[in-house]
Image (cartoon, helix red, strand yellow):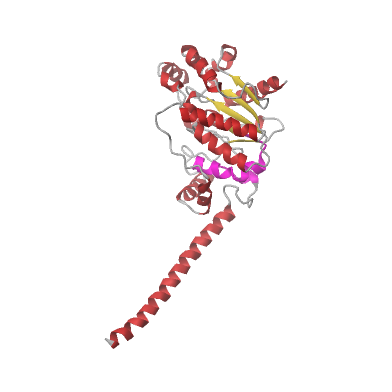
Amino acid sequence: MTFYILTFRPMEKQFKKYFLLLLSACIGIVLLFGALNVFFDVFGLFDFRDKDKVRVYGEERFSKYLMTFNHIPKHFEGMILGPSLSANLNPQVIPDKNYYNLSLMGARMNNVLSLASNILENNGTIKEAIVCIHPYVTADTGAEDSDFMNPDTYWKAFGSVNLLRVYGLGVIRNLDLWPSKYPKNQYEVNGSNSFESLFRVEDVSGRIAKEVDNVKINEFEIGSSYRKDFKTLLTLLQKHNIKTFIYYHPVPYPIYLEHRDKMDNYWEDILSGTNVKKEKLFSYYNFNKPGFSGFSGDVSNYIDHGHLSRKGQETLIKEIMVKWNQIDH
């Protein structure tokens, strides 16, 4: 028994020694990885990178949400909020204003609210907002989509699977390894998403004609939670004195003509119960009407049944600024 105890004690000490060494090594690796992530600063959280080098490489929601903590509030004066329909609006054409396009692929109103809330909570220079409205953003699908955009996401910037994916896609894009799927400069430094080469359909006119018959009435039903989110968004913008332009995204004219009553009613419905028409900070415009058919009736402005072409987005964002200026005066 004595021999066993004498033999075991050195082994126990040796085990503790190696365990502490292993633990120290693991902690060191974690700290080093975290420090490297801070140094690379791909989301502009710590101002270690030039602001013109911070851009989205992948994991769009993850990336843009993290940029709302510091990069966007500190370096931009305005923001564009909406779904993919507004995601390719390039704000570089806005004169004398530095805008960031925060629109997300597949965004619903709760996503828009999450981004805007964090921006305004960390607000530095943001003074204006452009908000894209379309039935898709508020459609009552019967199920809430998962939204990981919350303050806890901040800590994933120090090390996470999402972060590793961003690094991997950054390498793929910068080396132009897979241009057909991950184009090198798909995302501009102002957040706009140049997705035309990825999403353009071969027969745009045919796609629009097909969509005329595919539109369903429930697509115009506003989810109760999304209606509440929209009102909360407006309250936040008003509270922080953000000058805001709310626009109804123009769908191709044949779709509007076939579903005119439902589309007109939706616009009135989403604005009802809000202070949009009374608040001086807010301007709004409906681009879905006969007077704008010169644009929405031109197929070259679209790449499918709703998303705009490069030509279309350039024209629309200029129209937004013209209408905004006219309404203000």
- Give the residues drawn in magenta, as a range: 51-79
Instruction: Give percent across and percent down for residue 1.
Output: 26, 86
Q: Is residue 67 magenta?
A: yes
Instruction: Give percent across and percent down for residue 271.
Output: 56, 22
Instruction: Give percent across and percent down for residue 210.
Output: 41, 18
Q: Is residue 155 left or right of residue 283?
A: left
Question: Quick one: quadrant of the C terminus?
Answer: top right
- Residue beneath the point at 47% across and 69% down: 24
Residue 81 appears in the rendering:
no
Q: Is residue 214 left or right of residue 95?
A: left
Residue 240 appears in the rendering:
yes
| Depth check, front residue: 228 or 76 | 228
Residue 75, compared with residue 279, is above or below; it is below
| Identity of the residue furthest to the left in this view | 1
- Residue beneath the point at 50% across and 65% down: 28
Specify the quadrant of the image occupied by residue 273: top right
